[in-house]
Image (spheres, helix red, strand yellow):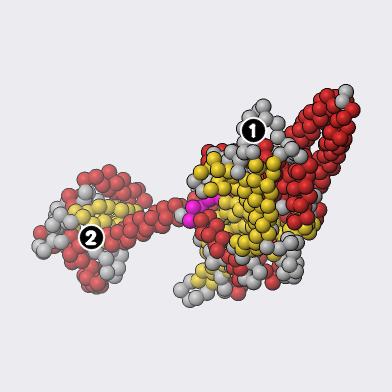
Amino acid sequence: MNEKKGVTDAIKISSPFKEKFYDIFFKTFPDPLFVTDIYGKIIDVSDSLLNLWGIKRKKEELIGQSGFKFLDPKYLRIVKKDHQKALEKGHFSNSLYKIRRKDGQVFYIKISASLIKDANDNPRYFIGVLRDITNEKKLRTELKKNKEMFQLVLDNIPQFIFWKDIDSVYLGCNKNFSRVAGVGTPDNIIGKTDFNLPWEKSQAESFYEIDRLVMESNKPEFHIIETQLQADGKEAWLDTNKIPLHNSKGEVVGLLGTYEDITERVLAKKALEKSEKKYRHLFDNSPYAIALLDLKGNIVDCNDTVKKFLTELTKKDIIGRNIYDMLLGINKDKIPMVKTFLYKIVQGRIHHSFELKLNKRNGEAIWLSVYASVLNIEDETLIQLMVTDITEKKLAEDKIIESEKKYRESYSQANLYKDLFAHDISNILQSIKSANEIMEIFLDNPQKSKEIREVSNIIKEQILRGARLVDNIHKLSQIEGADYLLKKTNLNETLKDSIEFLYNWVPNYNLNIEVDSAEENVVVNANELLYDVFENLLINAVKYNKNDIKEILIKISKKEIENKIYVQLEFLDNGIGVEDVRKNQIFQRAYNKDKSVRGFGLGLSLVKKIIESYDGKIWVEDRIKGDHSKGSNFIILLP
């Protein structure tokens, strides 16, 4: 109590009020108060200090104890430093201490204290005030954590973030922005303007003007596309957003800016535009007709070359139409084939080409080569058709094929003519030789003049026969080359001449030739070589016949086959006949029954070729079915 009185005595207030003032001050002051001597011994404390410390005892129980024991031992060094400072300067302010309450709970306080001297100016007491800053410290710690977390978030966002005050002075940014600005850490941006950063002056001016627009209009600006020269010397394309910031009164106090580096996107877009421009140039100027179809066959795009095949339509008319609808009409028969091809291409995801013959609306036929493939553009699957006109190529191929066919036919005909000439000339020369030998025998006998004249006639006949052979070969070559050389030919007259020739050729043979024809003048589409065909068949009927009487029956009739009328000739003889295994072989050019037997005429293989040149047919059957030895029946059908 005496110590307390000493304190009141030391307070420089008029005596009547000292103790009253002291008591009121200790009771009403909002923060805890304490009084110690200069050594730290407690002289007095306010009730609020007891509450802060969690002491339920009366304060008289604390008086006389050292206040240092209530402090965390780690802070004793600071206490001694503050104690010395107060002794030297008379006070210390806001020193932070960590205090442990009686219940073990830790809290933080700030202490300010002043030195009180006695009347002789000797230091006697310390009077101090405590401020509990535990909640404030927790709040600051939490705020620091939040700030660190906020900065961590900002620094890990791929975008570039900054904020400025009303004068466009930077107040902060994230690491990405500080890096491109060349300032190192985000703290180094504070206080700078765009004119202090590495952007070009014109860019800084543009940034400033947009800042002013946003803050003065109090309206955000989104997706500002602009360029920025960065610290590394590279120019970047930015997609920037700027939003005004407000204080609690709603007043604009700055702005928040964010931007995304879209350089790669812009460059990719430019490259794509360049590529698309090149593709469009190639697309529009391609010699191929190019069309893009959706999976339903609708034309979504095409180039101008398509008009080459659809001259009556413009490109505008073509786009949007369905390819299958366009094939309706004169080309509708092609729809199933085209659908099948396109279906296979889509299902197999493979390239495929095919040739297609179409008719234009004007009736002109064209051949197209179509190359089809599948294109995946974003989420859409399209079919690309590349079409080229191959009509000239097809015509050239047809000409080549026709030329090759004609060459083969010409080659075959050359061999035919060679065989024909060798075969018939050999027979003619043999006949002349035989006649000459007979004539030499008769020359020494004047009584044989009649026989000599007959032999002479034979020689003349054979010479004419040779001339006719050469003429017929010439005619045959003409027949092979042009159908118009065929003409209406009287079959009966030609047959009559051939029979007469046979009688003259073998005057000493006993021949019995009959013709059975329902009509006297049967007309067929043939030519002069028909005479040689009949002649050859008649000669063979005599040559290959061992009977004394050579019988030949010729039947002429008409027959309807598959709604077409044919003239049928049957040459029936009583010769040696043809075995079944040789019925086809005798018409083959390489076949010859007996090399020692010299035939006459064209030969059966050549006869067959001539009959076929008339679009006719020839074959051999047995005269009596099942017995080839009873003679042959050569049957000819002529249209």
Q: Is residue 350 magenta?
A: yes
Q: Is residue 244 magenta?
A: no
Left or right of 613 in this view: 131: left
Identify the image quadrant of residue 168: bottom right
Circle 2 is placed at which residue position?
34
Disc 2 is placed on an element classified as strand
Q: CB atoms at circles 1 and 2 under 8 Å apart?
A: no
User: Is residue 166 visible to the viewer in this orientation of the structure?
Assistant: no
| Residue at 26% in and 47% down | 75
Mark 1 vs mark 2: in front:
1
Disc 1 is placed on an element classified as loop
Between 49 and 170, the one nearer to me in the picture: 170
Is 318 placed above or below 580 here? Answer: below
Left or right of 572 in this view: 450: right
Highlighted magenta segment, given as a residue range: 346-351
Neighbour tally class for label 2: few under 14, some 14-19, many 20 plus, Cα within 10 Å: many
Which residue in the rendered view is the most extreme toward the front? 447
